[in-house]
Amino acid sequence: MSFLSGFIAIIGPPNAGKSTLLNRIMETKVAIVSPKPQTTRNRIMGVYHGDGFQMVFIDTPGIHRTRSALHKSMVGSALATLQDVDVLVATIDMENPDDPEMSQVISNLKGIKRPCILAINKIDKGAREQLLPIIDSYSKKHRFDAIVPISAQTGEGVEGLLNEVKSRLGPGPRFFPEDMNTDQTESFLVSEIIREKIFLHVRQELPYSSAVTVEDMTEASNKNLLSITANIHVETNSQKGILIGKGGSMIRSIGASARKEIERRLGVRVYLDLKVRVEKNWSKDTRALKRLGY
């Protein structure tokens, strides 16, 4: 039998559970998650290996109405992915099936001649009798190749989703070695972990005005210690004050939480030095966005 392979984009509006789904498929954390929408800013890849096949999943930023240069970059990244993959998995939140952003998602699916599967996510939180009306409604909105109810949180239905994806793969090469599950560099992984902790520790809008860059990563082999210096970029002095916190309490909490996860993910002791820098209106400046990796 031919080896099957292909690239699969996970798309949908913000907060539909796309990153949680990727992590569930991979059975390990490759994408950061938080309860806040628009946590994912870059395309995140996970390589799923099976007997005779390889699926390369790409988690994308939520498709939504854009307001700033950062949002335009995020949505542009997601939409560009639609043209580069073999199969699409559109994800909706069962608790919010009428999300107005879904109209933009479906509009962008029109004319794309690739298999598209609809995953109705978070069925563990919704009433099951609501499923049939949702399925009926979306069957009329777009000609999906399959509609699969799932819970990315518990794993229910995910195996069925994978089977639907696999059945639509064509013969192809093994794109990545079997011991590789993501293409993320260590510095990108570190920056994402720090950014996730900002989302989890800081309330309101500040996480959306922050970006993280890794300045230096140096390993002292004789001490089994990885020394990391990272910058957290914010847009105003008041945001810097909030992020640092009274007596440095907030930045210490973020740093301690990030350091523990980095150590767990990389398997090495870590010294983490976080610096907060003000870069006025970086999310609206296209040059700053490129410099910060967007």
Image (cartoon, rainbow, N blue to C red):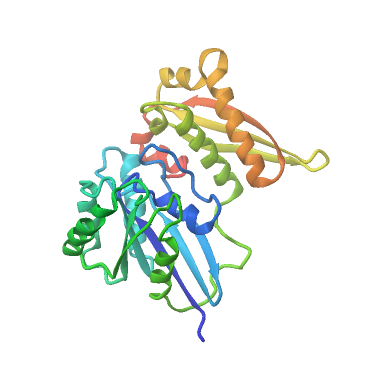
Q: How many marks overall? A: 0
Quarter the C terminus occupies: top left
Up/down of 41 relative to 1, above or below: above
- Relative depth, front residue between 287 and 155: 155
How far across and how far down the image is residue 236, in percent? 40, 22
Q: Position of residue 145 (x, y in %)?
A: 28, 70
Question: Is 293 situated above or below 47?
Answer: above
Q: On screen, 126 above or below 165? A: above
Q: Looking at the image, which is closer to me, 23 or 171?
A: 23
Question: Looking at the picture, how far across and down is residue 104, in whole percent?
Answer: 22, 52
Query: Toward which corner of the image does residue 217 lie, by quadrant?
Result: top right
Q: Residue at x 42, y 21 (%)?
A: 239
Q: Residue at the spot x=43%, y=72% of the render?
A: 166
**Residue 253 shown left or right of residue 33 in the figure:** right
Q: Is 143 positioned to the left or the right of 10 in the image? A: left
Q: Residue at x 26, y 38 (%)?
A: 67
Between 214 and 189, the one nearer to me in the picture: 189
Q: Is 220 or 246 nearer to us in this picture?
A: 246
Residue sitting farthest toward the top: 247
Is 226 left, or right, of 203 in this rendering?
right
**Residue shown at 47% from the left, 40% from the top:** 292
Residue furthest to the bottom: 1
Residue 149, by quadrant, is bottom left
